[in-house]
Image (cartoon, rainbow, N blue to C red):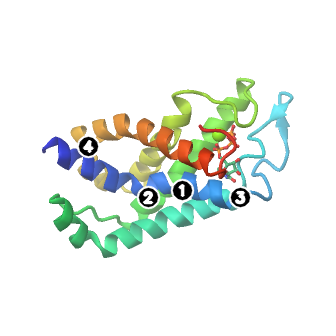
Amino acid sequence: MSLFSAIATALWAMLPAYVPNNAAVLAGGGRPIDGGRTWGGRRVLGDGKTWRGTAAGTVAGVALALLLNAGSDTIADLLGVAPVEFPLPAALGLALGAMCGDIGASFLKRRTGRERGAPFPGLDQLDFVVGALALAALLDFDWVAATFTPSVLAVVLVATPLLHVVTNGIAYVIGAKDEPW
Ligand code: CTP
Ligand code: MG
């Protein structure tokens, strides 16, 4: 597989996992998942993880996967790569898994004394990738194994942190996010 094909396939296959975090930022607010509860004197998750944000992010990711499925032949022709088709369990795994990875990261941040919005370099950029791939693999292992070949997976692990930094920087500049991470 050429480098271009690996990059195109990686970004295509990960789109349903990239969008949820951004949708959650735009839709977030309302009741926090932890209901305000604390553990060891600190919030379990914090006000930055809400039911509404999580639901909106998951729905956005699944909806995008279905939209991409509808246009898969056209996209494959345009890019010159084999089409990526998202079975529903895989789509749900990528979207909900991305949200869960991000929630897990907040849990770790609070346990390590970091307040809401504090950066945790590395974790901030890869939490949702790990969550997305793990839940997708749990729900449709064969699809994950067939789609994320070693070269595609390598691109995902290198390109995702870069993309995350850029999109969060944009969200910060346009005022959608309080911090650029
Ligand atoms: N958000 C949400 N629900 C989620 C994830 C995000 O409502 N499951 C919204 C919140 O409004 C949050 C914003 O998106 O403040 C930015 O997300 P993120 O950077 O992940 O949260 P932080 O506020 O930085 O909190 P944390 O330190 O826990 O990551
Ligand atoms: Mg944050």
Residue 82: image x %, image y %? 17, 60
Give the x, y percent position of residue 133.
41, 46
Q: Is mark 3 within 8 Å of ligand 1?
A: yes
Left or right: where 175 falls relative to 168: right
Look at 53% across and 65% down and name the residue there: 60
The answer to whether the residues at label 2 and label 4 have Cβ atoms under 8 Å apart is: no
Circle 3 residue: 51
Q: CA distance from mark 1 to mark 3?
A: 13 Å
Judge: label 2 CB < 8 Å from ligand 1.
Answer: no
Pointers 2 and 1 in contact (CB under 8 A)?
A: yes
Q: Which residue corresponds to mark 1? A: 20
Q: Earlier in the sequence, mark 4 or mark 3?
A: 3
Cα separation between marks 2 and 4 = 16 Å
N-terminal label among 2 and 4? 2
Q: Marks 3 and 2: in contact by CB < 8 Å?
A: no
* Residue occupied by mark 2: 16
| Secondary structure of residue under mark 2 | helix
Per the rendering, the mark at residue 152 is 4
Nearer to us in this view, 153 or 89 = 153
**With respect to residue 96, does 69 lie above or below?**
below
Three-letter code, disc 3: Trp
Tell me the distance, in whole angstroms, between the alpha carbons under discs 2 and 3: 19 Å
